[in-house]
Image (cartoon, rainbow, N blue to C red):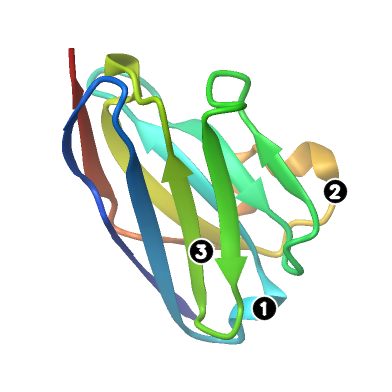
Amino acid sequence: QVQLVESGGGLVQAGASLRLSCAASGRTFSNYAMGWFRQAPGKEREFVAAISWSGTRTYYADSVKGRFTISRDNAKNTVYLQMNSLKPEDTAVYYCAAGRVSYPNNYGLASKYDYWGQGTQGTVSS
């Protein structure tokens, strides 16, 4: 089992930044790829970003490329999502997830992740 706890959400104005953190406990954190997903009201959960277990490969949804950066610190069992130039359409509950993902095409698929956090709300006002 892997337990995931997100933090860092909040209310900001458009153009501002937020940094989300996801702290993991339980099984060896460095064995797992990590992903960030989000779900806006009335919408399906969507992929945001992912990072390989080693941190050498990262993947992003087109909607956040160039604005969001995912990173991880395996010594601290934590994955981060730095969100810059935020837009109102970025408003959502953000979830981190852990999974034994290896193929590049699978990083964006929620079904490939086994463990999920409870989510943290990020709200961007216009």
Residue 73 location (% of width, % of height) = 58, 73
Q: Secondary structure at mark 2?
A: loop
Instruction: Locate residue 101 relative to residue 116 in the image: left or right.
Output: right
> Badge 3, how many Cα within 10 Å: few under 14, some, many 20+?
many
Residue shown at 47% from the left, 58% from the top = 80
The answer to whether residue 110 is seen in the rendering is no
Looking at marks 2 and 1 on the same chain, the residue that comes earlier in the sequence is marked by: 1
Looking at marks 3 and 1 on the same chain, the residue that comes earlier in the sequence is marked by: 1
Residue shown at 51% from the left, 64% from the top = 79
- Pointer 3: what residue? 79
Q: Is residue 101 above or below residue 107?
A: below
Q: Nearer the viewer, residue 114 or 84?
A: 84
Q: Amino acid at mark 1?
A: Ser
Can you say which quadrant of the picture contains the C terminus? top left
Counting every numbered tag in the picture gives: 3
Looking at the rendered image, the disc whose residue lies closer to the viewer, 3 or 1, is: 3
Q: Which mark is residue 103?
A: 2
Q: What is the distance, in whole Å, between disc 2 and disc 1 at their CAs?
A: 17 Å
Residue 47 location (% of width, % of height) = 54, 34
Q: Is residue 24 above or below residue 110?
A: below
Q: Secondary structure at mark 3?
A: strand
Q: Amino acid at mark 3?
A: Val
Residue 100 location (% of width, % of height) = 71, 64
Residue shown at 61% from the left, 26% from the top = 65
The answer to whether residue 16 is seen in the rendering is yes
Q: Amino acid at mark 2?
A: Tyr
Q: Nearer the viewer, residue 25 or 126?
A: 126
Q: Secondary structure at mark 1?
A: helix
Residue shown at 36% from the left, 53% from the top = 20
- Pointer 1: what residue? 30
Q: Is residue 43 above or below residue 109?
A: above
Q: What is the distance, in whole Å, between disc 3 and disc 1 at their CAs?
A: 11 Å
